[in-house]
Amino acid sequence: MSTYIMLSTLTPEGVQTVKNNPERIREVNKEVEQLGATVKAQWATLGAFDFISVVEAPDEKTMARVSLELGSRGTGRYETLSAIPVDEFIASL
C-alpha cells in the first residue's frame, strides 16, 4: 500500500454540510473505503486547509479515483501528495 497526504479545503457548501451534519466527515471516510482506499489518520486544521488526512491506497490510480470522486461533489477542493517513508527515501538515494 502507498501512503498519500490529502489536503482538503471545504467550499461554502461543504462548510454548511459539515455544520449541519458533522458526522458527514466519517461518512465520507467510509465512502473512501468503498473506492479502495483507507483513511488512516485525519485532523481538522486551522489555516489554508480545513482537513489533513493520511490515506493508504494500493496505487496512484485508486487515489486519483478518490480525489476525482470527492472533488466532483463540489463540497471541497483537494490536493494529494504522495508520501515516501524517510527510510525508503534515504535507501533510494
Image (cartoon, grey):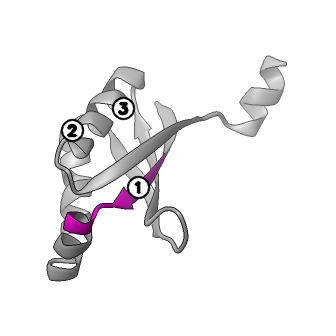
Who's the residue at 53% across and 74% down the image? 46
Mark positioned earlier in the residue sequence (1 or 3): 1
Q: Secondary structure at mark 1?
A: strand
Tell me if I can see residue 23 in this picture: no
Q: Which mark is residue 41?
A: none
Q: Secondary structure at mark 2?
A: helix
Q: Is residue 18 left or right of residue 8?
A: left
Choose mark 1 or mark 3, whichever is in front.
Answer: 1
Tell me if residue 53 comes above or below residue 84 in the rendering.
below
Q: Quadrant of the C terminus?
A: top right
Horizontal and vertical percent position of residue 87: 77, 34
Give the spatial CA distance, label 1 vs label 3.
Answer: 14 Å
Give the residue at mark 1: 8
Mark positioned earlier in the residue sequence (3 or 2): 3
Choose mark 3 or mark 2, whichever is in front.
Answer: 2
Give the residue at mark 2: 69
Give the spatial CA distance, label 1 vs label 2.
Answer: 13 Å
Q: Nearer the viewer, residue 18 or 38?
A: 18
